[in-house]
Each structure stands twice: as structure tokens, then as C-alpha cells.
Amino acid sequence: MNEEMMDEELKELFRGLEEQGWDPQLCDTPVPLFDNPVKCGNPTEIGDVVGEEVMMPRKWTTLNSTFMATVEGQSMKDADILEGDKVKVETAHTYHDGDILLLSIDGAYTLKAYCVDEEGTPWLVPQNPTFRAFPLHERQNVVVHGVVKEVIKLTPRISYRSCIKIINDVKMDMMKEREITPDRVTTAIRRIADEIEVARYWYAVYRVLVDKGVVMLNDFDTFCTMVKDAVPDHEHLPTSDEMQRLAVDSFAKPVSRWKPSDAPVKGKRFKDYLKLAQRMTELLDE
């Protein structure tokens, strides 16, 4: 009863997948997997010991003998056959230019592309420029064991170090893209100056420039000089003493950490400072 229920559930699952455009297959056919790896480099001995059986869908097998082998080496990497992959091989009595063959040469096995040149000489052709193609000669004992019909990939995984390097490179590029030039700062100060109605409000601008790394923390003199150079005729220019008196409580922290309950100003005045800080950030990020 349980097996019948499982069969019905499986059929229902397959029907659902098929309705979504998938082609589900049941792995119900054992295929031998040879224990020794097949060299993609120089020919090597594979042996005849079957290490285990791999279950595959019946649809993926043919009347020809089918078996699996594990790839070793990098000579077929440009055909996307990499070390650790498994290849499904079918025995074949005929093969064509471009077929990837599993064959033995004087008893040693290898995996290569097959091609006959204009003179009728058969060649084995690696798919990696660091390896050389080589012709097959009559004096060699060559046995073709099958044609590669499918490559089963290992689960791909990229090293953490490689990922972090790429991420850091992108971060550096992003920092360069966001680099705040002196001209950009001057323009932003000039544009926000009309919104500064009290000299102390310049503190919001100062804090944003500190957060952006434009001005050093507590370097009020440099900030005041920047403002005076940008808008020398402004009615409410900042002073170092005023700026320093505001650098307390949450105002001594980045703008993102300002709190109305822990600030040197309260109510509407706190909102005014916060609004100016947000506006300055927008101007610098434009």
C-alpha cells in the first residue's frame, strides 16, 4: 500500500514538473563506473575494475553498451570536460570527425577528439593549446572503446579567496566612482548655503563631510575655511567654537546614528539639522 502511494505521488510530481516545461527522468538503470580515472592528458591505464554503479534514467541509455568513467587532467578543458567530471561513454562501431573518443593505445587509455586530416591520417586532438595533437599509426595497437555522449559535471564551486578578490576589486572601483572631488564639495556647499539660516546649522554639513571622509573628525578649522572659501559673502558663516560645542551626544557620531532623544538640540531644531544633513548627502551623491 505504501509503495502504491509512493508511485502515485511520484507520478503526480512528474506530471507537475512536465506541466512547467521540465523533462523529469527516473534514475532506474544501473550503469558501471570504472574505478580508475581516464586521463585527458597522456594515455594511461584505466583497468577493467568497476568501482561502483551509477543509476541513470533508462532514456539516457541505449542498446549499445554504456558505462561511466571519471576524467583526470586538463587537455579537454576547452570542450568543458574538466578533471573530476564523469563522462557517459557508449560503445560504437563508427565514429566521425569531432567525436570525443575513449580509446586505448598500446593498452593505455585516453580521452581525445577524433579527426581525419586531408591526407586521410587519423589524429587525436586535445582541446587545450598547451597539449599537442598526435597522429595514430598502424603500428600502434589502438582500440576505440566508445564515444562520449554526455558529461556529468561536478557541483561547481569557486574558492572563497577568489570571490573576495573579485569583491574587493569591485569595491575599489565603486569607491573611485564615488570619489568626492574638491570641486564637488565646493558646489554642494554653495548650493546648500541658501538653506543655512543660522551659523550653527553648518554643523550638519560638517558632519556629512566627516562621514564621507572629506574632512577629518574634529578638524573644525579646515571645515570653516572650506565654507568661507566657497561662500565668502554668506551672512551666517560657521566658527570652530560653535561647531565644537555641537559635537556632543549623538551629534558626535555619524548622521545615521543621530537620535532625537540623545542630541544637543531638540524638537524642530533636531529635524532641521537632520534635514540639512540629508540634503548635503544628496548633493554629494548626485
Image (cartoon, helix red, strand yellow):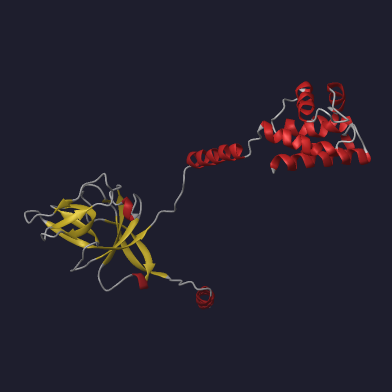
Q: Is residue 17 above or below residue 142?
A: below
Q: Position of residue 273 (x, y in %)?
A: 85, 37
Residue toward you, 186 or 201: 186
In the rendered image, is residue 136 in sight?
Answer: yes
Q: How many marks?
A: 0
- Please state if 196 lies on the left or on the right of 215 as rendered: right
| Residue at the image position 90 percent from the left and 33 percent from the top | 198
Q: Residue furthest right?
A: 267
Q: Position of residue 52 (x, y in %)?
A: 33, 58
In the rendered image, is residue 258 in sight?
Answer: no
Q: Quadrant of residue 117?
A: bottom left
Q: Position of residue 245 (x, y in %)?
A: 87, 24
Q: Quadrant of residue 149?
A: bottom left
Q: Quadrant of residue 217?
A: top right
- Please state if 66 lies on the left or on the right of 122 as rendered: right
Residue toward you, 224 or 14: 224
Residue toward you, 13 or 209: 209
| Residue at the image position 72 percent from the left and 27 percent from the top | 215
Residue toward you, 226 or 68: 226
- Please state if 94 lies on the left or on the right of 284 as rendered: left
Q: Is residue 108 above or below residue 151?
A: above
Q: Position of residue 157 (x, y in %)?
A: 46, 48
| Residue at the image position 74 percent from the left and 32 percent from the top | 209
The quarter of the image holding the C terminus is top right
Q: Is residue 49 above or below residue 266?
A: below
Q: Residue furthest left?
A: 139
